[in-house]
Structure formats: structure tokens, C-alpha cells
Amino acid sequence: MSLAVYLVVTLGFAALTLGARGRPGLSTAFGLVGLVAATVAALAIDPTDVVAIGRSGLAASAYARLFLVLGSLVGLGLALAALASGTRRDAPMATLATLGIASLTLTLTDPRIAVVSATTGGLFGVWLILAPGADRAGATLGIRELRAVVVAGMMAIAATAWIGRDLTQLAAQPVVFGLAYLCFALAVAVRFGAIPFHLWAARLTDAAPETALPIITVLAPASLAIVALAWIDASIAPLLVDLELERIVVLAIAVASIVLAALAAFVQDDLEHVVGYSIVGDAGVVVLALAVLEPAGWAPARLWILVFIVTRSAFAAWAGGIRTTFGTGRTPDLGGWAIRSPILAIAFGLIVIAGVGLPGLAAFDARSSLVRLALDGPAASMVLLGTLAPLAYYGRLLVIGLGRPSGATRPADRAIEWRPRARRPDLTSPGAWLKTTWQGNRAFSGAVIAAMLGVLALATSVGAFGGPAAAAGLPAIVEGPSETFAPTPSGGIGPAPVESGLPSFQPIPTR
Amino acid sequence: MNPALAGVALAVVLGAVVAGSARSARAAVLGLVAALVLAPLLADPTPQPFGLAARLIAAILAGYLLWVAARGSGVRTGGSRLGWPAEVLIASAAAVVGYGSEGLGAPALGPALAQAAGFALAALSIAPIASGRDVVRVGTGLLLLANGAILVRTALGGTPEALEEVAIAGMIAALGGAVAVLAMSARADGTGFELAADRSVRQRRFADAHPLDPQ
């Protein structure tokens, strides 16, 4: 029931926001109220909530609840940051719709339905790409994003459909299992824009503002990645089939994304591209987790996804704050930004610690575990070093920020400064006073939002909110898995004996 | 072979051929709607009424939104450069492969005809998705691919339950709506659905790369 409330709140407010699109003020109000209500509804989700529908259904979990709480909070933060920087009034609507569909994706117990839901969730991103005036360039980028979302979704649908049935009379070679695994892993890589599938994601930054990027390339694909992890854990990991070749392909994509994306972010001069490539780099760790075909990878992978969502959103909000304050996102023009805006400097520090981490932090340990589980020997050490590559672009931004102030780092608008400025409340015209106060404090608001998201990111990275425990929780199963691999106790062929709440790690006879 | 199912499969594939080859945008939308509306019927047993209704409504809604996006006389889309006979041959060859590989290595729970039609739709979607030069053509390809994948899923796993049908309906409607929104954006300057030309050289981004949204 609590799941239904969340779904109604998110999709209901998304519809209201869309319906009021002709009246921007009302639409924005609906969107922000909706995101606040979504956060409250997410907090109210009962982790034991189960709704059986036919042979499958919806089952909440502590992890789904935490994902939705954090998703709603960062959605609210990004919407406010977008409001401060004055871009894309459709952001709250798309965020609400994406969160609503993500709640379905995370709680559907049948992966065949969950991948359909995850694909649907990715379709709302087009609203964020279209420029306010709606133009051909935006439509071109939008259709390319749709292409990536749909092609990835259909790969995932094909993979889950092939395995999601009775395979006791398998006539195909076991290699087909490997193809199904590869298909789903590639689908996740395409959705994240992992290298070499990054062209659409790189172009996206030309049209979507930085505050919208996490909704399109982090939040929506993350739900598909979580489904992929559950599906691989239940259907692929227990196989007695040699999947080394497929793993190598997935590992190559993951390592290329981790290292090359950090390099690409380092050489970019636009903050949008830095944010975009930083997302690709961290997504590489998620793809790496798909190559860990052991139950030990389950908890760290899911914890990393939570940290990934919050940290990248905070970084995007920071970039939005920079644009609001200085009126530019070009790094050569941002000399001295850290000196001129101390709040943004604090936010930046929090984001760096949360994203790169320190030994002992839950996120750092989770990422290290994933690397060690996926790779052995010197390769593991090298990739572990590669995960620290973001320090290069963070360092470059910091050097610029501490350098000689450039002319561009004067506030873009004299009325906008990083410090709060409040006039005496005018009770005779509270609306005008609020509007003036908001306009005069947009830079301050953007910086504070980035700092708050930075605190949230650091808390998630530390392991607060019960993240590690929630990530270690197993997915609820309304009924046995849809695929049938193992003989039943009676000797016949039927659903594998699965204790409710536990995945079926049953070895599959493949000959 | 069930003759009724064979007739439905034939109609689905013919609709997809029209969608993939027509140069009139509205003709392409009509063909697409035919394929989308008839696809859920290509199952044995027939889907539960609630799920079937959801699929039909979603297909009509997606088609309606695309129809609105293509309003006006003589609105063109790319169409097939090879012509409809080549599209028929491609669809036929793919359908034969799909029918012949029923179950893809394990017993299928749905009709082989669904797999045949699914393969045909997927084959027809490749050219628009890979080389389409306008929003409606690429969008048509994406809808054909989605429909084809769902048909293959139906052939492998049997008729989807009501919950899955509703989820599929949501995806089809959302995809149709997204393509329609993009198509209308592309046509905002009054010319056509063509994609913007790629810039061979990255341009310097200025501070106003993301103009403020007029509030």
C-alpha cells in the first residue's frame, strides 16, 4: 500500500506539473511540492510491503526505500538548483516521472517486467533535452537518447525473456547463456553511456543543462543496473557455464570507462562535459560490478550505486551553482572561483571526499571490493589506481579555483552574489518581496543546495542511513523465480525450491 | 498452424512494412498503428481482457500522438530508400528465420508465429534506427523494434500476464509520446522532421550555452 502511495504521489504530481506547463509558476510549484511529497512518501514506504498481482507482483525492500528517499532528495535539490540557474522548467516533472517508474522497476519481482519498466523510465529524459523554445537540435539529441534507451531496453528484454522460462529441455549450446548475460550487461553499459557507447551521452551535454544530466544518465539507468544485478545474481551467477570471454568484454568496457572517462573529464573546458564524463567514469564501476559473478559482489555493488547517484547529483548541482554565480561554465574563465565563492569551495571538497573516498569509508571499501572481486593480481591494483583518476580533474578544477581570479569570476549579475542578501520583509507585498529576495540570492541558493547535496553525498559515502545493511538485503520473491532449472523434491520438473526472501542459487544442469 | 493467428501475424508484418517504407508521414503512422494494435492478439492464449485493453489503448494513444505530430498535408518522412518490395523481402526472410528457430534452443511457451513476426519487425527496424535521417523515421524504427522484441518475448515465455501487459502498454504509450514530442520540436521551424546536421568540429561553448528559461 505504501508503494502505491509513492507511485500515486510521483506520477500524480508529474501529471499536474505537465498539465500546468502553460503557467510556469504554477507548474514549478506543483513540481517542487511533488518532490517534497515524494520524499515524505518514500520515507513512509514499508520495507515489508508486498503486493501480489497474478504470479508476480511488487515487493518493497529497505534498499528500494533508501534508493527512493535519496532519489527524491537529490531530485528536489537538482530541481532547486535548476530553478536558481534558470534552466529547464520541465526538470521537476521529468524527475517525478522517472522516480515513479523507478519505484516500480525496483519493486517488481519479475525481471521480465522490471526491464520494461526501466526502459519506460528512461523515456522521460527527452523532456530535459528539449530546449525551452523546442528546436531541431534538441530533437536530434532527444531521438538519439531514445535510440540508446530503446535499443538497450530491447536487449535487456530479449535476455530476460530467453532465460525466464523452463530451460530443462535446453537444446542450445550453453554459450547462449553467456550471450544473454552479455546482452544485459551491454544494455546497462549503453544506458549509462559507458565507453565505447558514450557518443550519445557526450552529445547530450550540448543540450541538457548540468542539473538535468543526473536524471537522464544516473537515476534512470541506475534502476536498470539494479535489476541487472539481481537478474545476474539469480540467473547467471549460479551457472556452471564458462563465461570468461563474456566477462572479459564487460571488464574491458568497465575499465575503459573508468580510466578514459576520467581522462576525458580532465581535458574538457566545459563543466557540463566534465560532469558528463565523471558520470561515465563512476558508471564504469557499476559495469564492473556486473562482471563479478559472485554473491559477494551484491552488497558493494548496490551500495556503490547509491553513492554514485548522490555524489554525481551533488557534482552536477555544484556545476549549476558555478554557472549561476559566475554566468559561465567554461573552466578557463573560472580562475579564482573557490576564492570568490567559499560555499561552492566547501561543496566541492565534500563532493571530492564523497566521490573518491578515503580508506574506511563505505563507498571506498565497496569500490575496492568490486575491483578485487572482478580482477586478480596486478590488473586489480592498476584498476584500483584507475578509480582514483577522478582526482586529476578534481585537482585541475581546484587549481583553477585557487588561481588568479579572472574577470569572468566577478558575479555574472551585480545583483547576484554568493553571500545571502535579505531586505526587510515587506508585509504589504510579500509576493514581490519573496521574488526579489529569491532573485538576489540565486547564487547563494545554488551554492547552499550544492553544499547540502555534498553533505548528503558524504553521509551516503560514509555508510549513513543504513546504506550497507540495505544494500546487503536480498530481493523479496513473491513466488519462485520464473525460470525453472532444478528438479523439484518430488523428482519432477518444476519451480526450484526457494525459501521466500532468498535468491535461488541453484546450479543449472547444462548438459 | 492456427489460420487466425497466421492472418494476424501477416497483418502485423504488413503494417510494419508500410510503416518502414511509406514516405507520407501519416501513412507510416497508420501502418505503425496497425502493427501495434494487432501485435497483442498474436498470442495463444489470448491475453486477459484488462491487459489486452491496456495494450490497445496504448497503441492507439501512441498512434494518435504521432498523428497529431504529423498533421498538415503532404508531411513527408524518409521512407525506405530500397522501396517496399525490398522491405517485404527482408521481413519475409526474417520471419522464416524466426519461425524456423522457434524457441531459440528450448521449448517455446508461445506461438511460433509471434516469433516470426517479431523477427520480421526487428529486421525492418534496423534500417530506420541505424540510418534514419528524420525523427519520425527513427521513432518508427524504435517502435517497431520494441514491438518486435515484445513479440519474441511472447513467443518464448507465453502470453504475458495482465501486469506485464500494462507495463508494456506504458512503455509503448510513453515511447509514442516521446517520439511525437520530438517530432513536433523538430517541425517547430515549419520545415520537416529532418535531424540537425552533425557538427564535424566541436564549437566553443559560450557562457550562454544554456539560455535561461523565460519564466
Image (cartoon, coloured by chain):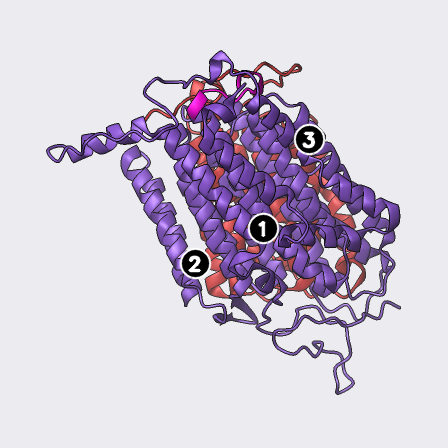
Chain colours: A purple, B red
Mark 2: secondary structure: helix
Between B56 and A109, the one lying in front of the other is A109
Q: Which of marks 2 and 1 is in front?
A: 1
Residue at the spot of label 3: A392
Mark 3: secondary structure: helix
Residue at the spot of label 1: A461
Residues at circles 2 and 1 in contact by the CB criterion of under 8 Å: no
Q: Residue at x 37, y 34 (%)?
A: A445
Instruction: Name the image quarter holding residue A150.
Output: top right
Q: What residue type is labelled 3?
A: Ala
Between A89 and B148, the one lying in front of the other is A89
Q: Which chain carries label 3?
A: A
Q: Give the quarter of the figure containing the N terminus of chain A.
A: bottom left
Part of the protein shown in magenta: A325-334
Q: How crowded is mark 1: few (under 14 residues within 10 Å), some or many (20 or more)?
A: many
Say above or below: B48 vs B139.
below
Q: Position of residue A303 (x, y in %)?
A: 62, 55
Q: How far apart are marks 3 and 2 (CA)?
A: 36 Å
Mark 1: secondary structure: helix
The question of residue B190 being in magenta is answered with: no
Q: How far apart are marks 2 and 1 (CA)?
A: 20 Å
Q: Position of residue A19 (x, y in %)?
A: 32, 41
Between A161 and A336, the one lying in front of the other is A336
Q: Which mark is residue A42?
A: 2
Q: Which amino acid does label 2 sit on?
A: Ala
Q: Nearer the viewer, mark 3 or mark 2?
A: 3
Residues at circles 3 and 2 in contact by the CB criterion of under 8 Å: no
- Residue ranking furthest to the left: A428
**Going from the N terminus, do you reach mark 3 or mark 2 first?**
2
Specify whether disc 3 shares its chain with disc 2: yes
Q: Mark 1 lies on which chain?
A: A
